[in-house]
């Protein structure tokens, strides 16, 4: 790899006051570039794509004790859709890529320094990959190399498309995955300790804690996108990226998203409903302000350069104002199905809202979380990125936001392109941290 920006730095953290206003307009994280130079840029004639091997934009989580340090998570590595054979195919430009956690620190001069990286590993200590799972959580997608040739070793039972991150006070991490979906517990060295998913036969789930069966009906690539922990470190809370395929893909244009709460003491769970502002939006981050109050990111897929009215907003939500689906009493209206979960007049909540509407659901005393707008990123920042994916509450007034840069490239109708932020195609997308102040982030 060739260095671009700062290299790793093991310097001691500095906890003196830092002027957070220096990060308001956005500061890029250090990154490297992959030594792949032969992919034509479909967006710009006579240019080749620069692949950013940073990718620390899936989620961020504050260091538990160092105020100006944060952890950032990569996803499964540089990949793109390759469904020419109708097999849900993906091209992996670096099939051996290992998802990782980076530790970063804000600097006095307004830059960001990378202090270290933690590779994610299976229980034996083998670095994992982002390749598809073979069994539990498998989506049957086929893995290809950059030339469109099927990979000889195209699956990894411990492979993750990592999206949500929580750094705990004991030095361990929880990471969520948007395929399984899996919630995976890693030790401080990145070695898997345990996991939680919806597959009761999965021996990797050491604690015996599981998600409800219906979470296996997640929409592919839209699993547990955001993850957080309650202030007492006892309850883990995840939010799905979008409507689940429950019972099938006919409902995935809905605006209903599920939030799941897992009690880490006993494995008990809660479920709540979130109503999106626009159908088919994505919920990409959740952060606990208290046991019942959270920040949630909701976005569309548009760039500001293409749509000045793009949707990138942060909401404050309250689950204590919502109905816990796990406590709904069974009756003529409500039944439980082993694979679909709660049914309302024979329909899943996804079906019911799509067919009957939210008002009909309210008449049955099923309420979504209460929500209020905290900040519109497009209005406040002219936010240029298509994906806001990480939130870090620095204090009760300052919120940091980070984007997923997709390693600096994208794909349109099967053609790979550099991912540009401007109409002139001169600014390549990269992981950028913005800090917004004067917000009300108290629960």
Image (cartoon, rainbow, N blue to C red):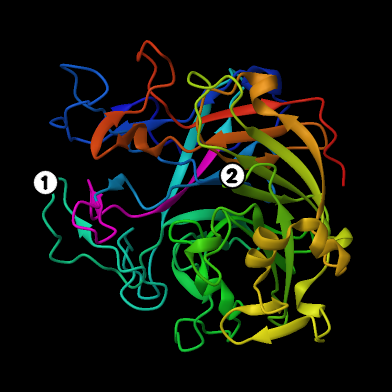
Count how many numbered circles sit on residues in the image.
2
- Local packing at callout 2 (Cα closer than 10 Å; few below 14, some 14-19, many 20+) is many
Q: Which mark is residue 240?
A: none
Q: Which residues are the magenta region? A: 83-104
Q: Mark 2 highlights which residue?
A: 281
Q: Secondary structure at mark 1?
A: loop
- Local packing at callout 1 (Cα closer than 10 Å; few below 14, some 14-19, many 20+) is few
Residue 63, percent from left and from top: 64, 47
Residue 356, percent from left and from top: 72, 62
Residue 85 part of the magenta-drawn span: yes
Q: Which mark is residue 147?
A: 1
Q: Secondary structure at mark 2?
A: loop
- Front-most of residues 273 and 205: 273
| Depicted 187 relative to depicted 6: above or below | below
| Depicted 14 relative to depicted 121: above or below | above
Residue 317, percent from left and from top: 80, 49
Q: Residue at x 13, y 50 (%)?
A: 148
Q: Is residue 48 left or right of residue 410?
A: left
Q: Residue at x 51, y 76 (%)?
A: 194
Q: Main secondary structure of the magenta part?
A: loop
């Amino acid at each position: 790899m060739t260095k671009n920006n700062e290299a790793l730095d093991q310097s001691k953290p500095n906890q003196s006051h830092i002027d957070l206003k220096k990060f308001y307009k956005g500061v890029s994280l250090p990154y490297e570039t992959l030594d792949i130079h032969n992919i034509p840029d479909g967006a710009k004639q006579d240019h080749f794509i620069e692949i950013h091997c940073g990718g620390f934009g899936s989620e961020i989580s504050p260091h538990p004790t160092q105020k100006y340090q944060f952890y950032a998570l990569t996803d499964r590595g540089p990949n793109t859709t390759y469904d020419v054979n109708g097999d849900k195919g993906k091209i992996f430009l670096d099939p051996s890529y290992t998802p990782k956690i980076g530790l970063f620190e804000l600097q006095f001069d307004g830059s960001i320094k990378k202090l270290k990286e933690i590779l994610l590993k299976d229980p034996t200590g083998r670095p994992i990959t982002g390749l598809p799972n073979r069994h539990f959580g498998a989506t049957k997608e086929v893995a290809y190399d950059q030339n469109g040739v099927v990979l000889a070793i195209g699956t990894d039972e411990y492979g993750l498309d990592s999206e949500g991150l929580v750094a705990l006070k004991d030095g361990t991490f929880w990471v969520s995955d948007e395929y399984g979906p899996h919630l995976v517990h890693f030790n401080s060295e990145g070695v898997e300790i345990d996991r939680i998913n919806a597959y009761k036969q999965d021996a990797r789930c050491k604690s015996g804690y599981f998600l409800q069966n219906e979470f296996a009906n997640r929409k592919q690539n839209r699993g547990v996108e955001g993850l957080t922990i309650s202030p007492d470190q006892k309850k883990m809370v995840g939010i799905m990226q979008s409507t689940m395929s429950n019972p099938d893909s006919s409902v995935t244009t809905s605006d209903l998203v599920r939030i799941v709460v897992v009690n880490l003491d006993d494995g008990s769970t809660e479920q709540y409903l979130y109503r999106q502002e626009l159908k088919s939006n994505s919920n990409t981050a959740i952060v606990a302000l208290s046991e019942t109050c959270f920040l949630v990111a909701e976005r569309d897929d548009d760039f500001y350069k293409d749509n000045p009215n793009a949707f990138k907003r942060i909401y404050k939500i309250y689950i204590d104002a919502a109905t816990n689906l796990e406590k709904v009493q069974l009756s003529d209206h409500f039944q439980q199905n082993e694979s679909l979960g709660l049914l309302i007049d024979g329909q899943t909540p996804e079906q019911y809202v799509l067919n009957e509407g939210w008002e009909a659901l309210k008449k049955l005393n099923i309420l979504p979380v209460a929500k209020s707008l905290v900040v519109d990123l497009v209005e406040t920042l002219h936010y240029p990125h298509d994906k806001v994916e990480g939130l870090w509450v620095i204090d009760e007034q300052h919120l940091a936001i980070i984007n997923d840069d997709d390693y600096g490239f994208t794909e349109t109708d099967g053609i790979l392109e550099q991912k540009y932020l401007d109409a002139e195609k001169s600014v390549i997308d990269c992981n950028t941290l913005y800090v917004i102040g004067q917000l009300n982030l108290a629960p």
